[in-house]
């Protein structure tokens, strides 16, 4: 069976979800689950997949909310918000696995960027702040409230484009 602990980093490696998403490697961990880099075999592109922690499987209200909020977030298309491509669940090794397929961002979290570079110059910080505000403005117009905006949930691409992640908190 699948290991229910978050320490099982390679438990999904080479697994295929939804008959199309091949898990390549773990790239992150959050409160709700782990994030993996995967290959979408149908569209031949790299995606990110957030797999909900198995410990949440026993909470039907949480699963319902997870699916509802995933669909709400998928309704948003904006250059400063990570795109949601698919939502699914299936059984692997007798455990139900719930997941969200997202746009893969080739970049770093704002937290990692600050840790590596130190203080961000004022002009660049202002540029990031404007992009984050634009993303939140669009989300709010769709009645989606982030509720967990922090440097770990902001990705910055190599060309300084900001992408807000974890938009799974509806009002």
Image (cartoon, rainbow, N blue to C red):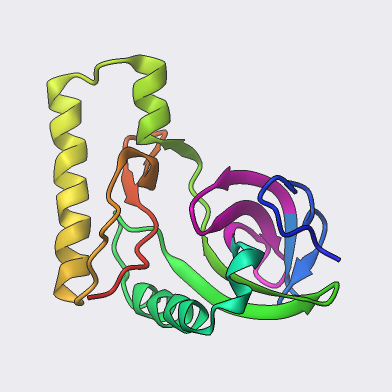
Where residue 30 appears, as percent x and y from the top left, is: 50, 50
Left or right position of 151 against 21 = left
Q: Farthest top residue? A: 118
Quarter that holds the C terminus: bottom left
Write the residue at 64% across / 52% down.
36
Where residue 52 appears, as percent x and y from the top left, is: 58, 65
Left or right position of 16 against 47 = right
Task: Identify whether 87 is placed above or below 40.
Answer: below
Write the residue at 75% across / 48% down.
8
Where residue 5 appears, as percent x and y from the top left, is: 70, 53
Q: How many labels does the image show?
A: 0
Quarter that holds the N terminus: bottom right
Task: Identify whether 148 is placed above or below 52.
Answer: above
Q: Write down the quadrant of residue 109 in the picture.
A: top left
Is residue 42 rendered magenta in the image? yes
Q: Write down the quadrant of residue 151 in the picture.
A: top left
Task: Identify whether 3 is placed above or below 92.
Answer: above
Write the residue at 82% across / 57% down.
14
Could you say which is closer to the camera, residue 134 or residue 71?
A: 71
Q: Range of the magenta residues? A: 24-50
Left or right position of 123 against 120 = left
Q: Main secondary structure of the magenta part?
A: strand
Where residue 13 appears, as percent x and y from the top left, is: 79, 53
Write the residue at 38% across / 76% down.
69
Task: Identify whether 133 is placed above or below 77.
Answer: above
Q: Write down the quadrant of residue 76 in the picture.
A: bottom left
Is residue 40 rendered magenta in the image? yes
């Amino acid at each position: 069976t699948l290991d229910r602990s978050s320490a099982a980093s390679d438990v999904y490696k080479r697994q295929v979800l939804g008959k199309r998403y091949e898990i390549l490697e773990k790239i992150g961990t959050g409160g709700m689950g782990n994030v993996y880099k995967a290959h979408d075999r149908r569209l031949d592109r790299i995606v990110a997949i957030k797999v909900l922690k198995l410990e949440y499987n026993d909470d039907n209200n949480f699963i319902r909310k997870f699916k509802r909020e995933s669909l709400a977030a998928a309704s948003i298309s904006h250059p400063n918000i990570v795109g949601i491509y698919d939502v699914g669940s299936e059984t692997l090794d007798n455990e139900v696995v719930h997941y969200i397929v997202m746009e893969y961002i080739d970049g770093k979290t704002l937290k990692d960027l600050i840790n590596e570079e130190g203080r961000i110059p004022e002009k660049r910080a202002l540029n990031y702040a404007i992009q984050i505000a634009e993303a939140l403005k669009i989300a709010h117009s769709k009645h989606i409230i982030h509720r967990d905006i922090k440097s770990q949930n902001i990705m910055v691409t190599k060309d300084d484009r900001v992408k807000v992640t974890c938009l799974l908190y509806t009002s």
